Amino acid sequence: MQLVIKLGGSILFGSNGELDLSLIDKWLDILVDLTQYAKVIVVVGGGYPARRYITWGRRLGLSEFECDELGIHVSRLNAYLLLAALRQQTKNTTIRIYGSIPTTPGEIYEARDNYDIIFVGGFIPGQSTIGVAAEVAEASQADFLVVATDVDGIYDRDPKRFSDAQKLDEVAIDNLISAFSKREEHAGTYSLFDIQALKLIKRSRIPTIVFNGRNIHTAKKLFRAMIRGDLQQIRKLATIITHRNQNKK
Ligand code: UTP
């Protein structure tokens, strides 16, 4: 099985801006466990420090391109931190971890067969790491793209603004594309999905799952359900993006 997991910056950093070391440790354990069943590519977000750098860059008069470059550097730094931490923890095992942070989908395409875990950050300006995750999922023909964020899935309304917002068990890709196509995007403010990512998910019919990666108990149950192929359980724990009404090309 090939998994692509997007670990959002909101998983790595607490609300005080500090790295959440205890949560990161638990995620590293999950990744080690997953290598028994799957090859894993982890796309790491920039989170709080990326947003700080982008704010500082704007104040210094940097362009949108340059602010995006800052975000890319920070996401790669976060990815390298996880890579190095996991390498330390697994040094007496046979787990094969790709030793640097790839900068193109092509590099991952070439490396994926020979490594159990690859960590990635940003690729190019004009997108967020969800774009990277979709590109990598397409290149590696992932069985699942798993988006770990700080809410329980995709909601009918913004759950951070509306207390009665309902989590959707599943949502059609075309509905998401129409919802996200009207948004404006600037460095540091890309939302959970961007339109390019959704188009890749659609054209390659990538089974995509969104869930709350701050809840380790849910994460463990979700990955077990994925390994069993238990869609009913996945629906309970997360939101599945469906491709049901789409004609296969
Ligand atoms: P993120 O994808 O991490 O954005 O990249 P985010 O909004 O902080 O999302 P979370 O919180 O991690 O989930 C940080 C910034 O880096 C730039 C963008 O400016 C983005 O907002 N970036 C990232 C790129 O320009 N290209 C990339 O491929 C990735």
Image (cartoon, grey):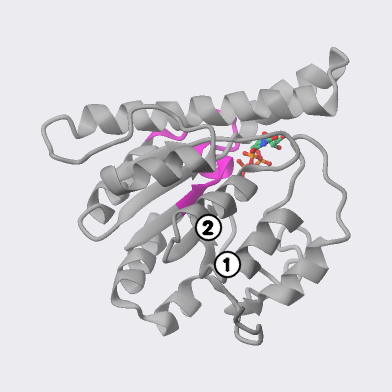
Mark 1, residues whose alpha carbon is within 10 Å: few (<14), some, or many (≥20)? some
Closer to the camera in the image, 59 or 107: 107
- Describe the element under mark 1 as helix, strand or loop: loop
Q: CA distance from mark 1 to mark 2?
A: 6 Å
Q: Residue at x 29, y 76 (%)?
A: 228
In the rendered image of this protein, does residue 163 appear above or below residue 22? below
Q: Position of residue 102 (x, y in %)?
A: 47, 33
Question: According to the image, label 2 marks what residue?
Answer: 138
Closer to the camera in the image, 210 or 245: 245
Q: Residue furthest top?
A: 60
**As shown in the figure, which amino acid type bears the numbered disc 2?**
Glu
Q: Is residue 249 visible?
A: yes
Q: Is residue 108 left or right of residue 113?
A: right
Q: Earlier in the sequence, mark 1 or mark 2?
A: 2
Please report the bounds of the magenta region as a residue range.
5-21
Q: Position of residue 11 (x, y in %)?
A: 51, 44
Q: Residue at x 45, y 30 (%)?
A: 101
Question: According to the image, label 1 marks what residue?
Answer: 204
Q: Residue at x 64, y 69 (%)?
A: 202
